[in-house]
Image (cartoon, rainbow, N blue to C red):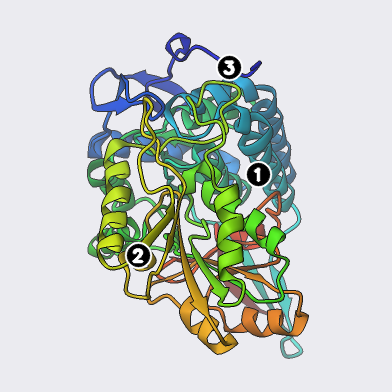
Amino acid sequence: MTNSFDPDSIELPIGHLIDGELLPATDGLAMHRPSDAAEYAHCPVADAEMVDRAVQSARRAQAAGWGSAVPRDRTRALQRWADLIESHARELAQLEALCSTRPVSQLAAGDIAVTAEQIRFFAELADKEGGDLAPTAQGSLGMTVTEPYGVVGAITPWNFPISMAGWKLGPALAAGNAVVLKPSEMTPFSSIRMAQLAVQAGIPAGLINVVLGDGPVTGTALTGHDQIAKVSFTGSTAAGQAIMGNIARCGTKPMTLELGGKSPQIVFADADLDLAADNIARSIVFNAGQACVAGSRVIAHASIADDLAARLMARMQPDRPGPTWQGDTAYSPIISEKQRQRIAGILGQAVDGGAEVLCGGHALDRAGYFFAPTLLDGVDQNSPAVQQEIFGPVLTLQRFDTEEEALALSDHPIYGLCAGIFTRDLSRALRAMKRVQAGTVWINRYGRSRDHILPTGGYRQSGIGKDLGREAYHANRQSKTVLIDI
């Protein structure tokens, strides 16, 4: 257990980071560790005045030349930052594991290493993506040029703190913007330290400012600020709707929203059932199902549904649950007692409606906010377990007889983030891929790995715009059309 550490020995960077300086604060929202339920700190709440201070700092830093500098200079600074993130992986992993649901053993070689790679990917776009010349009449020159927006307001969720910070900061900075970042009030520390490392890497102080606080106070002040030129948010659909409403009340500005999901996994009769079971179980057990992309709805052909269910139950046992700061922990806690009770409440409603619990369905008897991986059978389309994003380790199982029925069951009235398809028939896979309403479709696999070259984003109320890939870089620059008579 070489990754293990003492949670009470960690020095926490508590405060707002503005102009590269940490402004300490001791009061605010009570913080509880998911692994043992202990109250251990308070998260300060930035008010509108503090948010404005951060925005003005970002404006000064961006105007000083970051956006207009030689693009390769941005590339080099971001690459140095990625190097520092990697060299401080142990420190960052401890700060994140302490307060989050992410086991320390999964962070250094997983979330943090991938974040460094993503920053390098976006760094290389800084001097390789530009405008275009357009075909015009003789005697004219037409072109499009792109420019940074200025200051981007970014809000990240609690489930993958450093990963989500990388998603927002990497493309925004590479594109020449400054950023005011609000991490979740439950998991802010790795984001603060990450921003401090940016200054150490030579990224000018003030280009990344971090304000701590909740959504109603700090988030509202940030997204509604008239000098925030663009908003980037990852979180729940309800929170995304609130952000859109706040922006609309204050004016208009572009936004990128990656929101909730209730992703189907369709398993046809000819599928490799071990492959399907491995991928499906992993997608719902990973981080205890607390991921917007979790493949939480299994839709299986009736002839193989029972066999698949048996294989899933064998793979869904909670493997080494424990504190996130213990090196051999593999199964995560739920983020809070409130969220654990919500999971139990939705399960109770589903059971009252006729669902059968095949495995799990209860809190684990240990300290902290743990919940057993759960498989529900006998659910219909109207079950709350099918309709609602549970954000916990809960799978539902539905059966189909025909391809048309499978695709109809996969269709969700609200969400369209991701989908999985398992079949050996390439023609069927391609037909289903075209019919499924989702921003990302995985075939005979499920989940992201290190494929940050590909964009991610949802259909319907699962989001607007794309994160990752070239699309994320372009989403952080605005286009200007130029026509010259020569």
Percent of width and height locating residue 107: 60, 32
The kind of secondary structure element at disc 1 is loop
Nearer to us in this view, 129 or 486:
129
Disc 1/disc 2 C-alpha distance (Å): 60 Å
Residue 80, how many percent across, how many down? 71, 31
Q: What residue is shown with label 1?
A: 69
Q: Nearer the viewer, residue 422 or 45?
A: 422
Provide the secondary structure element on which disc 3 rests. loop
Local secondary structure at mark 2: loop
Do the residues bearing badges 1 and 3 touch, measured as CB atoms within 8 Å?
no
Quarter of image, res 479: bottom right
Dot 1 or dot 2, earlier in sequence: 1
Q: For the point 42% across and 40% down, which residue is it?
A: 158
Q: Which residue is mark 2?
A: 355
**Residue pictured at 23% horizontal, 46% vertical:** 216
Type of the residue with mark 2: Ala
**Residue visible at 44% across and 39% down in the picture:** 58
* Local crowd size for mark 1, using a 10 Å CA cut-off: few (<14), some (14–19), many (≥20): few
Residue 281 position in % (x across, y down): 58, 53
Badge 3 is on which residue?
4
Up the image or down, 405 lies above or below 253; here it is: below
Count the labels in the image.
Answer: 3
* Mark 1 vs 3, N-terminal side: 3
Residues marked 2 and 3 touching at CB (< 8 Å): no
Q: Decide if residue 158 is on the left or right side of residue 286.
A: left
